[in-house]
Structure formats: structure tokens, C-alpha cells
Amino acid sequence: MNDMISLTADNLDCFVRRIDALGGPGHPDARAMLDRAHYQPATSPDTSLDPFGPQWLQQQLDLHREISGRGLDQAANEQVDIDIDRHVAAPNAYDHWFPKPFSDHLTRLLSVLRLADPRRGSMLLDMGCGWGLSSEFMAQAGLQVVAMDINPQFVALVNRRAARLGLPITAHIGEFDHWGPAHPVDQVLFYECLHHALRPWEVLRRFATTLNKDPGCHILMAGEPVQAHWWPHWGLRLDGESLYVMRKHGWFESGFSLDFIRRCLALAGLEPIVENVLDPTLGQVLAGRWRALHGMAWLQALAESEGITADGTGGLTLTADATMRFGALPRELALVMHLHNPGPGPLNLQISANHMQEHVLLPGPNVVTIAGIQGGARLVMELRKRSLATRLFGGGESAECRLEGFDFPPC
């Protein structure tokens, strides 16, 4: 009974029929079979490729074609027919056969709400809202909800249930890459949907710009497949349920490692936050918090650093000799450092990367911009007290200064 079921593209159709005969993925008997699935791909993506690059994406699209048996067309493949009247009248939007899966959803959404701690009446954008359970939960908590989904039937269901229940929800038809809210929002929620995006870093960057500029504003994620079982960064999941829906519906079912999604949030100009769901077996809540200046959590998502330390007051200390080594990046970035020289004299800051920069830090606040940072770049910074001898001969006495934080145009 515990033997794995070996799958290839040739027997996926039979696998789908067997799951359907057992009652579909939501039935316990079908779930037991899904958990035993093991896929042997004919397509072998090269994990040494840049995870943000076009070659890696193309190899994932080739693997999707192998599994699904068709080309990717999200506008067509996401159009699933549902019994709208039945779900409008149901106790909850999913109309689950069993209460426990419903409770799992509520546990994840409750964890999201606790992390965000939004104000009553604030505006939440529910991306890829699907059946609308997440929209209803947030509206019942006192939020104003704008929802979006690619499937017109889901949008109709959400709007009709909102009218029946008297909830402040308005749902719209749209796609991640083209649709946006008419006005800035306080929270953006991706519940079980960001893994359908071909370029999740671009989606996060785009919707980060819709947030109000307030530290209480977030991009929020839950029910997302955070794992590095098959790929070190991101790529298609090869578990039984993902194989089933890719073959049957043609959906794009990716997952991402924790380090990768933290990097994507940082590249969107947000401070990454990771917390376990109240029931840790249900995964993690991921968030990106808007901040005017970023600190250590943001830096650690993008680069390995030495000589930059937290000072215990919310700021950082830049020591005499510091380095930052950046990981993969989708494009060049510019980094703005807000420094405070405690005085009394000026300091000399040298930065070597693709070229040498030298800055004089006068007593008080200083702003230093480092442009043209590429993936894999290593920045070396030397901070010295400035004197006539330093100017003539270099070197100088080591120094430290306060690093108030980083400002970052989203990448």
C-alpha cells in the first residue's frame, strides 16, 4: 500500500482518471494515492542557470509542456466551470465535503491576519481570490476587500456571495500582469495563488507599488508552496496533486525556496518577514512590509555581509572594514545608504565594486548611492578618519558610523 506510484508523461492520463474515479483530489482515498506519486521527468532543467533568467523560465515551460501535454495558456486553462448557484447557497464558498480542510484554510488566514494586524476599515486587495473564502474571511474581520481573479465564474460567485452575506467585497476579472486597483491599498494578499505566476518577482514588484506608504502596509502570502525539494530556487512542483492539476487543467504549478521568495520581496523594496502558521504543519506566512528605510532583514535577503551589525536600536553600525556579496538579481540595482557620522571630524568612505568610489562623510547625516550593482557583485567598504595624511597618503585610523538604513528603488 505504501509503494510509490512511478509516473511519466505516458501514464499521466491514466493517473488522472484513477484520481477522478476515487472522488477527486479532495477525497481521502484519492489523497492517499496522490501522496504516493513519483514523477520521472524526461526534461531535466539545468539548476546552475540564473533563476531570474529567460533560459531557466524556458526550461520550466518545456517541463510544463511535457507534464500537461499542451502549451501554456493561462487565460484559457484557468477557466474552470463551477456550479455557481450551489456555491452561492453553500455555508462556505468551497462547500467542502469535509470540515478539516476548511479549518486548515481558516488557520492559515487567521495567521495572516495576526501578522498584518490591520486597522478596521483598511483596504485589502485579494489577488487570485478563486472561490472567495479569503475575501470573505478578511471582510468578516472588518476590512474593505477588492478581489481579483482570472476566471469570470469565480468573480461572479464572489460578488453574489458578498451580496447575499452583506459583505464589503467587490471582485473584478483580471490577471497578475495587467490588472491593478484603482487606488492604493493597505494590504495585498496572495492566498494559494502566487505560485501560478511565471515571474513571481515581477508580480511582487508590481503590486508593491500599489501599497500605501505606511509601515503597517504589507504584501501577504499564505498557502504558498515554499520548498526546495525539486529545485534550489523555484520551479514546477512534481508532487501528485500538482501533476494531477497540470495534466487535467494545464495549470502552472510552481514552488519556491524560502531564500528565493525572501529575495523577491526584498527586490520589490519590502522588508521580508517569515512566521509559522499557528499550526506549523500548515506552512508559513510570508510578508513584505513597507518601510521608508530598510535594515538587516532586508539586507540579509539580498546579500551576505560582514562588518555591518545591528546596533540594538533599530539601526545598523558600519564598521571600518565591511563587505556585501550579492546573490542573483534580475537586473542591476542601485543601493542608497543613509549614514550618520557622529563627528567631530569628517570620515573617508571608499567603496570598491565594479569601480572605485570615494565619499567624504561630514559630521551628521550623509547619503551615499551605489549604482550598477549586478548579481554576484562583491562590495568592499573601508571607513577611515579623514586627515591631511589620509588625503595625501591614504590609509588612516579606523572608524565606525551609524547606518540608519537602506533606501532602495524596487528592482
Image (cartoon, grey):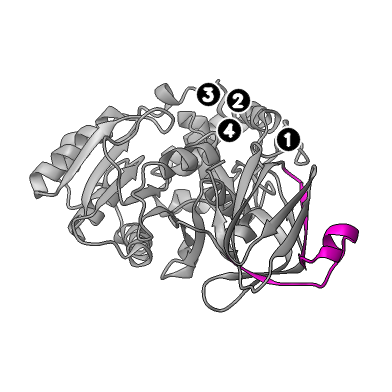
Q: Which element is circle 3 on? A: loop
Q: Is residue 222 left or right of residue 298?
A: left
Q: Is residue 130 left or right of residue 51?
A: left
Give the residue type at disc 4: Leu
Pointer 3 or 4: first along the chain: 4
Tell me the residue that label 4 is attached to: 12
- Residue 404 is situated, as x and y percent measured from the top left of the image, at 55, 65
Q: Are marks 2 and 3 in contact (CB under 8 Å)?
A: yes
Task: Work out whether residue 308 or residue 169 is closer to the camera in this orientation and state it.
Answer: 308
Give the residue type at disc 3: Leu
Name the residue: 79% across, 72% down. 398
Distance in Å between CA atoms under marks 2 and 3: 7 Å
Could you tell me if residue 253 is visible in this image? no
Based on the picture, tell me whether residue 165 belongs to the magenta stretch. Answer: no
Tell me the residue that label 3 is attached to: 72
Q: Which element is circle 1 on? A: loop
Tell me the residue that label 1 is attached to: 45
Q: Residues within 10 Å of mark 2 (few under 14, many from 20)?
A: some
Which segment did they paint magenta? 375-403
Task: Work out whether residue 403 or residue 249 is closer to the camera in this orientation and state it.
Answer: 403
- Residue 199 is situated, as x and y percent measured from the top left of the image, at 55, 35
Pointer 1 or 3: first along the chain: 1
